[in-house]
Image (cartoon, rainbow, N blue to C red):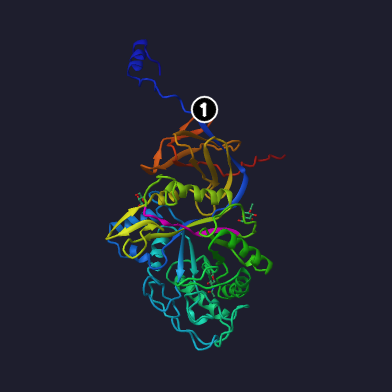
């Protein structure tokens, strides 16, 4: 288009005045898809101990809103893993999870009479809803075997599985095979109800004895059971179910479990070594060939908080953004699972154990949920790839199975920064960039991206904010093989 001189003057008169703000230096993060790290299984939460019922009992539209907050990949956290508790209690008093085997046969090889209530403490309903949102990873995790299979005759207060080496003798015999059969039955009931369980765990915090469901085990004892559970799953056509172990209270015990399972020769039967972060935080890498998942952690002490950044406290969303980031980037985790997705105020602790507070027919969302939402563009099966550069920012990149590239960046500084993403040497025909950010007053809000002539895509992120870029296009497509014309 050619402008007359007068028309040109007119465009100058209406143009916005030049910004008085100094141009921000772009903190450039360069991606290297040739550097490949671990595969990501996903991000998740639990609604164990009857917390799922809080969502079951909500009225619409609130119920749908909460489901969207948990599972929607375009408006919520887009969680991709649900960790369900396999109940071991005889009844549902307090918040206990009832078992499908409230009464055992009189001997370990007797025929069990399973009782399926079709609810499973609300977890079946929540899982079916998750399936409808496209969730495909369901981790069924027992806190304990039913009491009748244990040395102490109780599903609570520790005790061991009868028949495990090192356990005191049980008059009723060796229950290892019966426990494996029981776990298979639970998985089958879920599959029949349309929920494809993908992973199973048979312990929770086996290094901690408590007044609710708990069962003691070392890694060596766990390996002994794994050698029975694996062939039992396989015989029942459940070959694709992964065994996870052992839900240690903290990283140092989980590392012991990993080495004991390995020296017992059962590591090849384990999908993921699982750790919590209560008694020791995740740091460094575990050095195991199995995948590693963080399967339960939350702030159990602070009063209920919805802040993104208040003081860097254990309940802050920003703290959680960093916690998940560190686990995935520095400790090679393939999954990060928060503790409770939802809780109420009246019967549960008024603390930060939950992402969403459900109370009196209403709900309140914490920023911890939005910290996880920033990772929702990293889909199951993504491979972490190289990302480096930029000052005052932490970055990580992931190649999704559909070929899109997810880049998550935390601005550790207190001032706003302009963050740029450079695809480096990767040739990307027609890349399209989108970005979303979270801070004290925004929740995974889409923000404009500008692409410079050198291809660097940048967007501004507030101080102590987190931004996630999604690059669609042909990022992962292998370079076309030049056709060779012979003749
Ligand atoms: C997810 O949220 C978007 C935006 O609110 C909505 O249009 C879509 O229907 C939701 N998806 C599902 C599966 O409910
Ligand atoms: C075993 O599983 C496969 C794949 O899920 C299924 O097609 C087949 O029917 C199953 N066979 C039996 C005996 O259950
Ligand atoms: C990271 O985990 C994978 C399994 O997902 C494992 O093969 C690899 O050795 C681990 N790397 C480090 C540095 O621990």
Helix, strand or loop under label 1:
loop
Q: Quadrant of the C terminus?
A: top right
- In the picture provided, is 121 more to the left or to the right than 293? left
**Residue extending furthest toward the top:** 5
Instruction: Give x and y (percent) for residue 366.
Output: 37, 51
Q: Quadrant of the N terminus?
A: top left
Respond yes or no on whether mark 1 lies under 8 Å from ligand 1.
no
Density class for disc 1 (Cα within 10 Å; few <14, some 14-19, many ≥20) is few
Q: Which residue is mark 1?
A: 453
Instruction: Give x and y (percent) for residue 425.
Output: 61, 36
Instruction: Give x and y (percent) for residue 383.
Output: 57, 50
Instruction: Give x and y (percent) for residue 378.
Output: 50, 49
Query: Can the viewer see residue 471?
Result: no
Q: How many marks?
A: 1
Residue at point 38%, 57% (across, down): 351
Query: Can the viewer see residue 69?
Result: yes
Q: Quadrant of residue 10?
A: top left
Q: Main secondary structure of the magenta part?
A: strand
In the image, residue 375 sits, relative to residue 207, either above or below, namely above
- In the picture provided, is 293 more to the left or to the right than 7? right
Q: Quadrant of residue 474?
A: top right
Residue 30 located within the stretch drawn in magenta: no
In the image, residue 44 sits, relative to residue 421, either above or below, namely below
**Residues drawn in magenta:** 291-304
Q: Nearer the viewer, residue 407 or 26?
A: 26
**Residue extending furthest toward the right:** 487
């Amino acid at each position: 288009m050619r402008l007359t001189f007068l028309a040109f003057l007119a465009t100058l008169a209406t143009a916005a005045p030049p910004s008085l703000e100094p141009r921000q230096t772009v903190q450039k993060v360069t991606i290297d898809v040739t550097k490949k790290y671990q595969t990501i299984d996903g991000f998740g939460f639990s609604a164990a101990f009857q917390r799922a019922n809080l969502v079951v009992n909500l009225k619409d539209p609130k119920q749908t809103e909460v489901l969207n907050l948990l599972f929607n990949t375009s408006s919520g956290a887009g969680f991709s893993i649900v960790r369900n508790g396999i109940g071991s209690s005889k009844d549902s008093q307090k918040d206990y999870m009832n078992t499908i085997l409230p009464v055992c046969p009189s001997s370990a090889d007797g025929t069990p009479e399973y009782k399926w209530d079709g609810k499973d403490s609300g977890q079946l309903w929540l899982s079916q809803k998750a399936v409808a949102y496209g969730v495909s990873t369901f981790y069924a995790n027992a806190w304990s075997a039913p009491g009748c299979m244990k040395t102490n005759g109780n599903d609570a207060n520790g005790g061991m599985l009868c028949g495990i080496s090192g356990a005191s003798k049980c008059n009723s015999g060796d229950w290892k095979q019966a426990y494996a059969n029981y776990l298979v039955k639970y998985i089958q009931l879920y599959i029949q109800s349309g929920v494809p369980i993908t992973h199973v765990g048979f312990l929770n915090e086996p290094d901690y004895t408590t007044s609710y469901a708990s069962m003691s085990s070392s890694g060596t004892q766990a390996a002994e059971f794994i050698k029975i559970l694996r062939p039992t799953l396989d015989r029942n056509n459940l070959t694709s179910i992964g065994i996870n172990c052992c839900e240690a209270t903290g990283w140092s015990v989980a590392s012991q479990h990993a080495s004991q399972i390995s020296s017992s020769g059962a590591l090849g039967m384990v999908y993921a070594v699982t750790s919590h972060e209560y008694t020791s935080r995740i740091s460094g890498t575990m050095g195991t060939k199995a995948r590693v998942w963080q399967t339960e952690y939350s702030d159990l002490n602070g009063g209920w908080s919805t802040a993104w950044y208040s003081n860097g406290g254990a309940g802050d969303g920003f703290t959680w953004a960093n916690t998940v980031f560190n686990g995935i980037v520095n400790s090679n985790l393939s999954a990060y699972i928060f503790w409770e997705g939802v809780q109420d105020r009246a019967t549960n602790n008024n603390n930060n154990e939950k992402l969403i507070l459900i109370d009196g027919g209403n709900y309140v969302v914490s920023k911890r949920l939005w910290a996880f939402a920033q990772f929702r563009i990293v889909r199951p099966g993504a491979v972490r790839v190289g990302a480096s550069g930029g000052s005052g920012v932490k970055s990580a990149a992931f190649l999704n199975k559909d070929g899109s590239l997810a880049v998550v960046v935390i601005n550790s500084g207190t001032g706003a920064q302009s963050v740029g993403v450079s695809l480096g040497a990767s040739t990307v025909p027609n890349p399209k960039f989108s970005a979303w950010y979270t801070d004290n007053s925004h929740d995974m809000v889409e923000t404009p991206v500008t692409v410079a002539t050198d291809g660097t895509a940048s967007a501004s992120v507030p101080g102590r904010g987190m931004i996630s870029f999604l690059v669609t296009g042909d990022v992962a497509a292998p370079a076309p093989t030049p056709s060779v014309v012979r003749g």
